[in-house]
Amino acid sequence: MGLTGQTGFMFSRRTRILLGVLVVASLTFVILDLRGGEGPFASVRTVGSNILGGLERAAATVFSPITGAGSWWSSMRDQANQIDTLTAENQALRSELQILTNDRSRAAALDGLLRVAGVGQYRFVPAEVIAIGPAQDFSWTLTIDAGRNDGIEQDMSVINGSGLVGRVLKTTADTSTIVLIVDQGSSVGGRIAGTGEIGIVSGTGAQDELEFELLDPLADVRVGDALVTFGSKGGRPYAPGLPIGEVIEVSGTGGQLTRVAKVRPYADMSRLSIVGIVTKPPRVDPRDSVLPVSGDADVLPTPAPLGGSSTDEEGGKSDGAQPAPASEEESPATPASSDAPEGETAAVPVEEAVP
Amino acid sequence: MIWRQALIIGTFILGAVLIEVTLLSRLGIPGATPDLVVVTVVAIALAMGPVQGAVAGFAGGVLLDLAPPGDTLIGVNALVYVAIGFITGLAVDPRDRTIWILMGMVGLSTGAAVLLVAGLDTLLGSDRVDWEQVPMLALTSVLYGLILAPVVLLSVGWVVRKATPEVLVA
């Protein structure tokens, strides 16, 4: 097909027909998809997603040495410092190291997940992130390698070792799509740990920022306050008591009927590798017991502010707010501090509900 | 021969989609996700012509929307990529192809893809698009596109020259 015959606006008949078919097909897809709902088109889409999901699983396995050990970008910068030591090592040692660090970061992620699940009595299915939607789509979604065959259903909560990550948007046989809480369309019912003030936590589209809109305009919110999920009926889409994030900025009322605070999510959305899908929420709301413990464990057990902060406003609150900023630097779920919350659950009614 | 062309287009596009969603988007690099699919569509359009470019664009757009984490409207990407594939194949005269013109075409296409998809989504009533981020995403997308371009253009050109020399535009 020579180009000379097609320059200008005189295309051959075949070209015109083909171009027309492609454009009409695209527009038809858009219209059918906008209409939404169930139907032949939805099942065609499901079949397509199923096939591509399988291919993605295979591709993710191939690429796992590159993507597995956390973020490539940051590990590149770290490695620049160690370049002398690395060059001394031979190829075999290097690949072995790669596998080891990969395993270790996976083990750490699973440890954190087990802590959250253990303290809060959640039952979860672990899964690995295999694909992420392009940033230019403006939707914070990702694919995991567990689906209907693993017991995943729509609207289940997704957590990692630090806290709430998102919820299951749709499932195929072996993969599921998760929409993160930072997605613009996401909103979660949240409760301030301690005071129990409730509100709506919505995504802003930025990966490290959420917006918390309090239902009570006179509610007392401070920087450093921790948020947990309020819980929905039957634990769908969000199970109760899951840590969401920490208040980092409280904005003035500005004549609005509600108060708004900025919240940084506990889970680092840019470094998700292993996540857990909560298949069964606890029988009793774990209240605030799942929240990450701050650096020094002897300060006080987390649920204590329940009574403390509501009675003596100034003293109790500033105590509670103090250790929190420290925890954003260190990883919130260190194995050393995990003894404290486990010991304390025994005192909380959750233990009675177990048998 | 048409089947051989379809096979080449299909393989390149499917590979590009899989690499983009499972590898490139997970590298955690700042800004946009490197748009390997658009670069591949441009490469096919340059090597084979506008019609093949449009077909490649359609396939790439639909697959990208169908691939699991995608939660956007099916067809938006396809429409934009069809236009990019066709116009690229048409606009670049095979007689004066310098490296700068080819790279310029890749840059224009990757930038235009971000802007057009964001614009179409907004027109169709999606409130996801954050226009404050769009310029940065478009710029980074162009940058990553230019980085990917030499490898993709050369490998697509090489395969087309070997497998289907009858459609090679050179």
Image: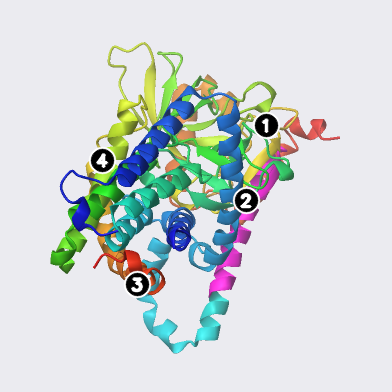
Identify the residue under disc 3. B161
Q: How is the image coloured?
A: rainbow
Q: Which mark is residue A145?
A: 2
Identify the residue under disc 1. A286
Q: CA distance from mark 2 to mark 3?
A: 38 Å
Q: Chain of mark 3?
A: B
Closer to the camera: disc 4 or disc 1? Answer: 4
Q: Amino acid at mark 1?
A: Pro
Mark 2–mark 1 CB contact (< 8 Å): no
Q: Chain of mark 4?
A: B
Q: Is residue B38 left or right of residue A280?
A: left
Determine the main secondary structure of the stretch shown in magenta: helix
Identify the residue under disc 4. B115
Is residue B6 at all visible to an observer of this figure?
yes
Labels 4 and 1 share a subunit: no
From the image, which quarter does the C terminus of chain A lie in?
top right
- Between A218 and A50, the residue placed more toward the observer is A50
Is residue B133 at all visible to an observer of this figure?
no
Q: Is residue A343 depicted above or below A229 in this figure?
A: below
Q: Chain of mark 1?
A: A
Closer to the camera: disc 2 or disc 3? Answer: 3
**Farthest-out residue, left:** B96
Closer to the camera: disc 1 or disc 3? Answer: 3
Q: Chain of mark 2?
A: A
Q: Which mark is residue B149?
A: none
Q: Amino acid at mark 3?
A: Arg
Q: CA distance from mark 1 to mark 3?
A: 65 Å
Labels 2 and 1 share a subunit: yes
**Is A293 covered by the magenta stretch?**
no
Closer to the camera: disc 2 or disc 1? Answer: 2
